[in-house]
Image (spheres, rainbow, N blue to C red):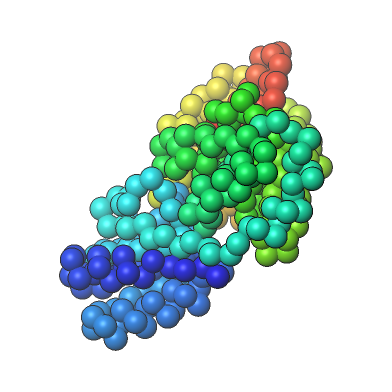
Amino acid sequence: MIKIDTGKIFQTIEEKKPNAVTLSVPDGLSRGALEIASAIREKYGINAIVMGDSCYGSCDTTDSDVERLGASLAFNIGHTISLEKLGRHTILIDAFDDIRFDGVLEKALPILAQYRKIGLTTSSQHLNQLNEVAALLHEKGLTVVLGKGKGQLRSGQVFGCEFYPAFDIKELVDAFVFLGQSRFHALGVAISTGKPTYMLDPYMEEVVDMESLAQARMKRSVLAVYKALDAERFGVIIGLKEGQIMVRRALDIKAKLESHGKGVVLMAMREVSPARLNEFREVDAFIQTACPRISVDGETFDRPVLSPPQAEALILLMEKKDPGSFLERRHWL
């Protein structure tokens, strides 16, 4: 069961005395947000506005929307990072899962026994259990390594596009374990490190080897790059979500494409989807600088839609150079 740190929400409201607040949550916590909004209204007599759009992470804050909605605080729930505040108004609120990993660990031990050193990773919801699981694995005779946090990431934590704590220890370990039910995050660890990666799902008590899925996503990513080689006109997309606005990155990609004789149109979008891109039939291929996972394992597009690492690989191919394993990196932006 996921427990939201409502105590911090109430304490912050009592300290800041806002006239109104907003609440952003990832999919699956909407009911909790509605309950918190009601509690805030009853307890403090102020409005709490639940943001109805999905919240994908600390890159998907609503800091600029707060004042437009007549509020003065924004609570971003369920995306624990190394910071407690982002922007002028956004406060990060923990939402930790209290489910135990004992059962799935017992199933994982025979599989993990083939490795000498294990790198341990997880996402925000299970950060509170990292040290306990590490101790349990150590008791069973495994050497466990936790990568140090960097930037917004805490030790052992990975985002969908940032993998410092995993990538930086990949030469020190033989395989990775991801704690949680998120294939999205576990797949990122597998692709970015190039190491065997196992997802330990505590709900289904299932050990999932990510290798075949990682290989399929890599093949798809490489194929999209080679298809984009034939494109003459590119759409370079700047994301409009607060943590995804990368104008300089987009301009740099635009300049490099134009240096190879390609036509480029700059675009800006909040949601990059097949339906929206279908409106622009004159464009042969797209490069989006919003979220790299849209390109790597998002929806299926009818034309190439590349992430920044894929765009770098494309440009290297245009220069007759080997792009190498272009997704094996700390950060996909």
Q: Position of residue 90 (x, y in %)?
A: 32, 57
Viewer-nearest residue: 258 or 295: 295
- Residue at 43% across / 35% down in the picture? 150
Q: Quadrant of residue 193?
A: top right
- Left or right, 251 with respect to 305, comes to left
Q: Position of residue 36 (x, y in %)?
A: 39, 77
Q: Quadrant of the N terminus?
A: bottom right
Q: Is residue 333 above or below residue 69?
A: above
- Left or right, 155 with respect to 304, comes to left
Count of numbered circles in the view = 0
Viewer-nearest residue: 20 or 208: 208
- Residue at 54% across / 51% down in the picture? 132
Q: Is residue 288 visible?
A: no
- Residue at 76% across / 53% down in the picture? 107
Viewer-nearest residue: 182 or 315: 182
Q: Is residue 310 above or below residue 54?
A: above
Q: Is residue 170 visible?
A: yes
